[in-house]
Image (spheres, rainbow, N blue to C red):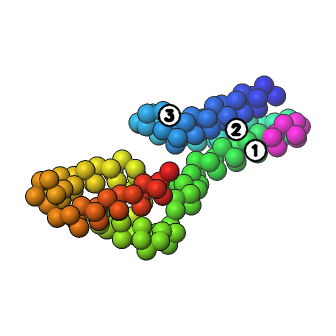
Amino acid sequence: MIWVAGAIAVFLFLAWVGKQSRLGRLKAGPWINQFRTLRSVISMGLVVLGITMLLRGLVWQGLAAFLVSFILGGSVRYQTYFRQSQEPAAASYSSEEIRAYNTLGLAIGADRKAIKEAWKRLMKAAHPDQGGDVSRASALNAARDVLLKRRR
């Protein structure tokens, strides 16, 4: 029974690490991929543990080990599937937002930092004090306002 409790503790720790890295609180790096490998290895070990427990007559503990193994292995296998489903589709953007992305020369769905950087870069040439056009500067400001309003 202690093996199952240890496996659950490791699973919860790895789930926490994954969530923290997705939220940007942990610096992404090659060690994140090592955790993915570690989850796969632990999942396979739990399958072996579950078979061993079933052969010894510990039915509920063996089934619990299988359940934890499938949850842990499934989180590795379908991780990219669930991540893709969380991203907004291009169809969820209004035509005004799509025009704003095109005005700033950005891909649809760019983050807040990219929006600000593109606006600054384009405003250096388009600002009226720098010899630029007033209508171009106002179009850039409107595009920035539309996109930053959505990003809040």
Q: Nearer the viewer, residue 29 or 104?
A: 104
Disc 3: which residue: 25
Q: CA distance from mark 1 to mark 2?
A: 7 Å
Tell me the SS state at disc 1.
helix
Amino acid type of disc 1? Phe
Q: Nearer the viewer, mark 1 or mark 3?
A: 3
Is residue 15 rendered magenta in the image? no
The stretch of residues the image draws in magenta is: 57-64
Determine whether label 1 and label 2 are within 8 Å by CB: yes
Disc 1: which residue: 66
Determine whether label 1 and label 3 are within 8 Å by CB: no
Tell me the SS state at disc 3.
loop
Amino acid type of disc 2? Leu
Q: Nearer the viewer, residue 105 or 48?
A: 105
Within 10 Å of the Cα at label 2, are there few (<14), some (14-19), or many (20+) other Cα atoms? many
**Can residue 90 be seen from the camera position used here?**
yes
Q: Main secondary structure of the magenta part?
A: helix
